[in-house]
Image (cartoon, helix red, strand yellow):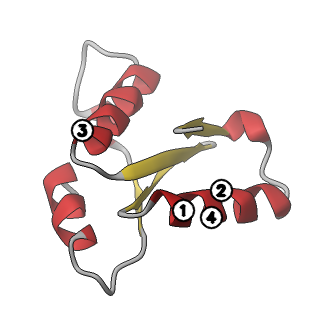
């Protein structure tokens, strides 16, 4: 999914979160997977959105229009036992 599509989905007031499997590091040579994820997070922030990654054997992007929603989900992810070192993004 394109980042612009995520942005458009989050402009719909009924959409609180977009979660997507992100495998684009296979398509963009030249940057490490972590650098690519950081660039995507930077782009989303520039668009006024909040986001973080859960990185395990596969990275998942969690994007939000409201930073309070992101904080709530990050808290839930931590409480279910996801190790802190698996979360990348806005602190």
**Residue at (61% x, 57% y) in the render:** 71
Residue denoted by label 1: 68
Q: Label 4: few (<14), some or many (≥20) within 10 Å?
A: some
Of the numbered discs 1 and 3, the one sitting upstream in the chain is: 3
Q: Which mark is residue 74?
A: 2
On screen, residue 58 above or below 28:
below
> Going from the N terminus, do you reach mark 3 or mark 2 first?
3
How many residues crowd mark 2 within 10 Å: few (<14), some (14–19), many (20+)? many
Q: Upstream in the sequence, badge 1 or badge 4? A: 1
Residue contact at pointers 1 and 4, CB within 8 angstroms = no
Report whether 7 appears left or right of 78: left
Which circle marks residue 73 in the picture? 4
Image spot of residue 59 (x, y percent): 50, 45
- Distance from label 4 to label 3 (Cα)? 21 Å
Query: Alpha-carbon distance for marks 4 and 2?
Result: 4 Å
Which element carries disc 2, helix, strand or loop? helix
Q: CA distance from mark 3 to mark 2?
A: 20 Å
Q: Secondary structure at mark 3?
A: helix
Q: Is residue 31 left or right of residue 59?
A: left
On-image quarter of the C terminus: top right
Question: Quick check: marks 4 and 2 in contact, CB under 8 Å?
Answer: yes
Q: Is residue 82 left or right of residue 12?
A: right
Q: CA distance from mark 1 to mark 2?
A: 10 Å
Which residue is identified by label 3? 46
Looking at the rendered image, the disc whose residue lies closer to the viewer, 3 or 2, is 3
């Amino acid at each position: 999914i394109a980042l612009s599509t995520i942005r458009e989905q989050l402009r719909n007031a009924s959409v609180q979160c977009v979660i997507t499997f992100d495998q684009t590091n296979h398509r963009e040579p030249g940057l490490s997977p972590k650098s690519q994820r950081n660039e995507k997070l930077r782009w989303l922030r520039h668009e006024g959105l909040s986001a973080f990654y859960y990185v395990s054997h596969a990275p998942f992007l969690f994007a939000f229009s409201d930073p309070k929603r992101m904080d709530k989900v990050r808290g839930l992810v931590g409480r279910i036992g996801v190790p802190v070192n698996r979360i990348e993004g806005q602190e």
